[in-house]
Image (cartoon, grey):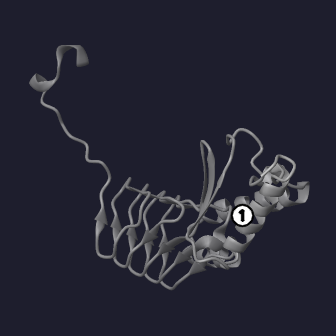
Amino acid sequence: MSQSQSPSPDTDIREAQQRLREFRRGKTAERLFTHPIDHPALPTGFCYCEGSFWKAAAFVIKAIIIAAVFKLPWNCLKVWTLRRFGARVGHQVYFASGVWIDPTFPELITIDDKVFFGMSAKVFNHEYRRNEFRAGKVTIHTGAFIGGFAVIAPGVEVGENAVLSAFAVAVHDVPADSTLVASLSRVIKRDAVPPNFV
């Protein structure tokens, strides 16, 4: 293809933004949307801050509301707020203090019944990598237990009755009835430590 026939960067990003809109509306079967970028410090075409003032303001208001509600003690208000912003949240879901839900694309989050989130657990639905933008559907199935300070990355599915231990980081699917354990700390005996180490 000659250079005059190759798509312009503007056309490419407009097509990618359209694909992201379709992904967010559930019109594609994929769980993960990806698009190459030059670097997250440069304009990517995906940040709310690159759009109109009103779109940026709407996002900031949404983020402030979600963050403020999740600091309150009323669990039913947390569930109601997530549902109002498009997340699918089942019954008897509990969010402990300090839980953080990514406000960027809440419509990509599905939480089934009887899921427990421990203190300061975090759920992400998008991320910037060095050369890639990602948005991902997160599904947490019935009876899952998300431990304190655990992190769930975009595109991850947590199976039924699965457990994420405290501080666990789920970057891949967690099968049903399994436990994802954070890296275990170990005590090293003093006589096993090299002299230069201490």
Q: Foreground residue, 44 or 187?
A: 44
The total of numbered circles placed on residues is 1
Q: Residue at x 77, y 52 (%)?
A: 1
Q: Name above or below for residue 119 compared with residue 93.
A: above
Q: Foreground residue, 189 or 77?
A: 189
Q: Answer with left or right where residue 95 lies relative to residue 4.
A: left
Q: Which residue is mark 1?
A: 65
Q: Quadrant of residue 57?
A: bottom right
Q: Quadrant of residue 33?
A: bottom right
Under tag 1, what secondary structure? helix
Q: Residue at x 74, y 70 (%)?
A: 21
Q: Foreground residue, 43 or 168?
A: 43
Percent position (x, y) of residue 36?
A: 65, 50
Count residues near mark 1 (Cα–Cα under 10 Å), then give few for <14, some for 14-19, many for 20+: few
Percent position (x, y) of residue 186?
A: 21, 40
Q: Image quadrant for the C terminus?
A: top left
